[in-house]
Amino acid sequence: MRKTFKKLAFLAMPLTMAVSSVATADEVNIYSYRQPFLIQPMLEAFTAETGIKTNVVFAKKGLIERLEHEGKNSPADIVLTSDIGPLYDVVEKGLTQPVHSDVLTSNIPAQYRDPQNRWFGLTSRTRLIYASKERVAEGEIKTYEELADPKWKGRICTRSGKHTYNLSLIGSMIAYHGEAEAEKWLEGVKANLARKPQGNDRAQVKAVKEGVCDIALGNSYYFGKMLTNEKQPEQKEWANAVNLVFPNQDDRGAHMSISGAALTQYAPHKESAIKLLEFLSEAQAQSMYAEANFEFPVRPATPRSALLNQYMGEFKQDNINLQKVAELRVQASRMVDKVGFDN
């Protein structure tokens, strides 16, 4: 079911009608795949600094289709996404426009922005290997490639191979090894699964804690979410049962992905929207944004949360441009089907 969030008003009428009736130059309309609590503090800081109001529509899915349907009449200025996948999709559908900004170019490293300036990363995360403290020795696994080693047969858990997080990882394997070698690797990982892919990333760490498997794939920010979960304190036990393995530290570095944003094709408040994008790339917003979800700021030399410094510290990150990885997601999806990864 679609859920709509709005900072101040325009809930009753269709969004297009509501915005057109009250539109001013000093506002920005945002379609967001990111949950409201993650972005609201930065938006409030932006309004306090600039006087520009922000209006947000949140949905877990369907916003790209909404943009397509609305066309030139869309009130949306910016699309915020929680992963490179939907960010790439909205660009490929021709629903965005490039932004040429020295601020964005200076603040966001090249691997985290589109070469044609059509999308920009705002926070980053890595795809970790979560390893059992009890059953996996330190240094026993060091790379993504080793996930296909027969020694791990019946010992790996992961969510669906078709999930956007795994498609990005598989896409990176294709980028580095070619399609044939990546397919052999994926077949090897499938042969090592302890169970059929299922659940979310946290469910994999839970499975490690319960002895279902010994290692699991998961995004880095879930560790922070589990370790600080007061509503479900059993998740703290899951987190404390694993060591964090940052893969490929001796070569290309750990696979990274992003949350990000793009300026819509027909943005009615283009100037204000660009100001918001630039604001989100600056140090204050970067720290706030990243800390809210235990992610890493993309802006260099921006302080990380205390929790990340304590448990993750510095590590080598893969610097491949994510545009290249995103372009390989279709091949990755076909590969998942071909090897029957999710069966």
Image (cartoon, helix red, strand yellow):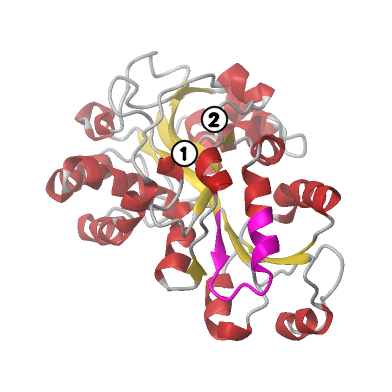
At x 38%, y 14%, the residue is 137
* Magenta-drawn stretch contains 247: no
Left/right of residue 2 with respect to residue 156 in the rendered view: right
The residue wearing badge 2 is 300
Q: Secondary structure at mark 1?
A: loop
Check the image and name the residue furthest to the top. 138
Dot 1, crowdedness within 10 Å: few (<14), some or many (≥20)?
Answer: some
Q: Are marks 1 and 2 in contact (CB under 8 Å)?
A: yes
Relative depth, front residue between 197 and 96 = 96
Left/right of residue 187 with respect to residue 52 in the rendered view: left
At x 52%, y 80%, the residue is 68
Whether 94 is drawn above or below 146: the answer is below
* Magenta-drawn stretch contains 272: yes
At x 51%, y 56%, the residue is 100
Q: Quadrant of residue 342?
A: bottom left
Q: Position of residue 17 (x, y in %)?
A: 76, 86
Dot 2, crowdedness within 10 Å: few (<14), some or many (≥20)?
Answer: few
**In the rendered structure, which amino acid carries the disc numbered 2?**
Pro
